[in-house]
Image: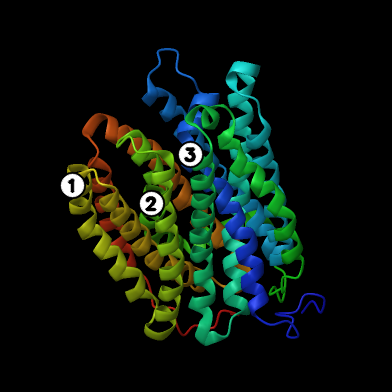
């Protein structure tokens, strides 16, 4: 054992592990989510359409949103392997540094009108850097949380991963609501959408300071190279990887549906931006609360049932809810749909993020979980907003619900095939 990197620094309360993970994770997801919230304005700044087709411009913006997902597998491989070699804390410090660079690129890049084609190129690069950071964040953070937790509270600790995403949505929604309420539409289009990104830059030093006190849980670093780890993972744990990707597929899609509701409300229902932000903020609050509830229930009743039943409920409810939403076009129904989608997604997703790391052995955990998460988010989450925008344009406003229902069915099948991991030893 490396005495400089003990399993957990016992003089530090385990709560510090949660605080360190949440501080950086919430900040990184905030930056990623804010892009989704302000996609309409970002589209106009960086991707103007020559024929004034709003859908063409918006499709370009959400496509670049998706670009950030496609560098996640690389981030998962590089930073996950780094976490298995050098420690969870070092990897999680690195992800905060990368997200800082990506956010800076989005916040200060001049518009297309000012610097021409260089503007969207810089934005694409910034999104790729953000994707690297988030691709490498989830594996080390999940590993650290379950490895530092008491055995009977592993799911609750791990549920803070999903809960921190809810915090990011809430904070992003509150910032978006405030900015949208204070500024005019002209100001939002011109420069107002940059304010939330600048706010995150101010908060980044706080996340770095908290993560410096992160308890290290890597007892013995792996001596395998990154290539060797990938070979071992896909040869010995192929089934676990496939099941993990299929389980997280529907979580990735429905999380993006929840994030997209702001754009949906503004672009489809013509609601004012501040009203649309209220709905998204409420959804984030539901994700925060019910993710933690799911963690507590999973510790008591096991992982599989808490992953399964919220996903089944969403699969059955999503289509009728969207029909009612489109028929009524009411703020109350928009609020209800957003809250239900995020509530059920949070419960299923939070439980998944403890069960999947528990299926992977200690020395490969950060790398494998990073890859599973990054692959599922890239293939399904990264394309979700583009697919949703395209479906709405060609098949109407209800069509995304069928997409969610179909992919949820596939995830339900994968969940049924998963082992129950509640009683395993995570240090093996």
Sequence-wise, the earlier of marks 2 and 1 is 2
For disc 1, the marked residue is 323
Sequence-wise, the earlier of marks 2 and 3 is 3
**Quadrant where the C terminus is found in the figure:** bottom right
Tell me the distance, in whole angstroms, between the alpha carbons under discs 2 and 1.
Answer: 18 Å
63 lies left or right of 412: right
SS category of the residue bearing label 3: helix
Q: Residue at x 75, y 55 (%)?
A: 205
Disc tally is 3
Q: Residue at x 40, y 47 (%)?
A: 380
Q: Position of residue 171 (x, y in %)?
A: 54, 55
Tell me the distance, in whole angstroms, between the alpha carbons under discs 2 and 3.
Answer: 23 Å
User: Looking at the image, can residue 166 be seen?
Assistant: yes
Tell me the distance, in whole angstroms, between the alpha carbons under discs 3 and 1.
Answer: 27 Å
Q: Position of residue 326 (x, y in %)?
A: 21, 43
Q: Are marks 2 and 3 in contact (CB under 8 Å)?
A: no
Judge whether 405 appears above or below 236 on screen.
above
For disc 3, the marked residue is 66
24 lies left or right of 188: right
315 lies left or right of 342: left
42 lies left or right of 349: right
């Amino acid at each position: 054992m490396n005495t400089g990197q003990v399993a957990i620094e016992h003089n530090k309360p385990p709560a510090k592990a949660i605080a360190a993970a949440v501080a950086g994770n919430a900040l990184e997801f905030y930056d990623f989510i804010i892009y989704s919230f302000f996609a309409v304005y970002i589209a106009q700044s960086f991707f103007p359409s020559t024929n004034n087709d709003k859908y063409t411009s918006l499709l370009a913006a959400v496509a670049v949103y998706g670009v950030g997902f496609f560098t996640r597998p690389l981030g998962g491989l590089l930073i996950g392997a780094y976490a298995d070699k050098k420690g969870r804390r070092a990897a999680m410090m690195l992800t905060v540094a990368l997200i800082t660079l990506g956010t800076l690129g989005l916040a200060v890049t001049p518009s297309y009108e000012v610097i021409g084609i260089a503007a969207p190129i810089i934005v694409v690069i910034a999104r790729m850097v953000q994707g690297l950071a988030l691709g490498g964040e989830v594996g080390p953070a999940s590993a650290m949380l379950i490895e530092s937790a008491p055995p009977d509270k592993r799911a609750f600790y791990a549920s803070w991963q999903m809960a921190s995403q809810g915090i990011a949505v809430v904070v992003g929604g509150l910032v978006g609501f405030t900015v949208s309420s204070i500024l005019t539409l002209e100001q939002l289009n011109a420069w107002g959408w940059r304010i939330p990104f600048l706010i995150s830059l101010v908060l980044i030093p706080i996340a770095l300071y908290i993560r410096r006190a992160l308890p290290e849980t890597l007892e013995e670093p792996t001596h395998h190279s990154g290539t060797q780890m990938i070979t071992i993972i896909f040869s010995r744990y192929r089934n676990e990887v496939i099941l993990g990707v299929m389980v997280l597929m529907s979580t990735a899609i429905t999380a993006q549906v929840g994030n997209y509701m702001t754009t949906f409300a503004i672009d489809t229902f013509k609601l004012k931006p501040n009203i649309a932000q209220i709905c998204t903020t409420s959804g984030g609050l539901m994700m925060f609360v019910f993710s933690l509830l799911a963690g507590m229930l999973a510790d008591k009743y096991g992982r599989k049932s808490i992953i399964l039943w919220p996903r089944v409920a969403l699969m059955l409810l999503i289509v009728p809810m969207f029909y009612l939403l489109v028929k009524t076009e009411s703020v109350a129904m928009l609020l209800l749909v957003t809250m239900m989608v995020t509530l059920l997604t949070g419960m299923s997703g939070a439980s998944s993020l403890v069960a999947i790391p528990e299926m992977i052995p200690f020395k490969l955990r950060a790398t494998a979980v990073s890859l599973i998460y990054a692959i599922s988010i890239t293939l399904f989450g990264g394309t979700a907003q583009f697919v949703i925008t395209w479906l709405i344009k060609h098949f109407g406003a209800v069509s995304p619900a069928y997409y969610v229902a179909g992919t949820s069915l596939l995830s339900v099948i994968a969940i049924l095939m998963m082992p129950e991991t509640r009683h395993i030893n995570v240090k093996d």
